[in-house]
Image: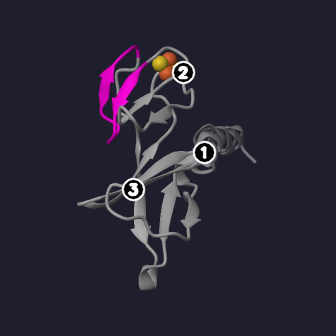
Amino acid sequence: MKRRSLLKRWFNWVLGALIGIPLVAFLKSQRFRPPVERRISKILKEDEFLIEPEFVLFESSEGPVAISRTCTHLGCRVNFLEEKSIFLCPCHQSRFSRMGRYLSGPAKKDLARFKVSTIENGQGYVVYIPR
Ligand code: FES
């Protein structure tokens, strides 16, 4: 084997490793993991809500809405205050509207909304929580 072809082969292996290893790491990352499906076997009436550890599920005139309970500032779990109809973060007092819109405090983004679908036969909901 000539020196030039050996160098070419070695270069191809190094190039393959430089591209392949980050590519495999990216594909195995959380971006491509399917969301966790949380089944709720209860039907809410309009303006009712259900508090779960990861989200609060509301039934509105537009259909079911699941608002994440993870604060967009530093990730504390926000509480839903029913009497004021707002989310309040216990860590740094950020406030969000009932639909997760940012109102005040150090968090500058709205709370995330999770995809919700109704189970066939109207027996409940499926909330899709991203990983
Ligand atoms: S973590 Fe919620 S306001 Fe800071």
Q: Indicate left or right for 116 with 27 as reference.
A: left
**What is the x, y in percent for residue 64?**
36, 60
The label nearer to you, 2 versus 3, is: 3
Residue at the extreme left of the image, as rendered: 61
Q: How crowded is mark 1: few (under 14 residues within 10 Å), some or many (20 or more)?
A: few
Tag 2 residue: 90
Magenta highlight on residue 95: yes
Which residues are the magenta region? 94-106
Ligand 1 near label 2 (Cβ, under 8 Å)?
Answer: yes
Find residue 20 and report its horizontal and vertical position in percent. Answer: 62, 46
Question: Which three-letter amino acid code belongs to the residue tagged 3?
Answer: Glu
Mark 1–mark 2 CB contact (< 8 Å)? no
Secondary structure beneath label 1: loop
Q: Distance between the residues labelled 3 and 1?
A: 17 Å
> What type is the residue that disc 2 sits on?
Pro
Whether residue 81 is in magenta: the answer is no
Question: In terms of sequence position, does the residue under pointer 1 or pointer 2 come before the other?
Answer: 1
Foreground: 114 or 17? 114
Name the residue: 24% across, 60% down.
62
Toward the right, the furthest residue is 1
Mark seen at residue 48: 3
Mark 2 or mark 3: name the one nearer the start of the chain.
Answer: 3
Instruction: Tell me which label, 3 or 1, sits earlier in the chain.
Output: 3
Residue located at (41% from left, 68% from top): 117
Tag of residue 12: none
Going by the numbered disc 1, the residue's amino acid type is Pro
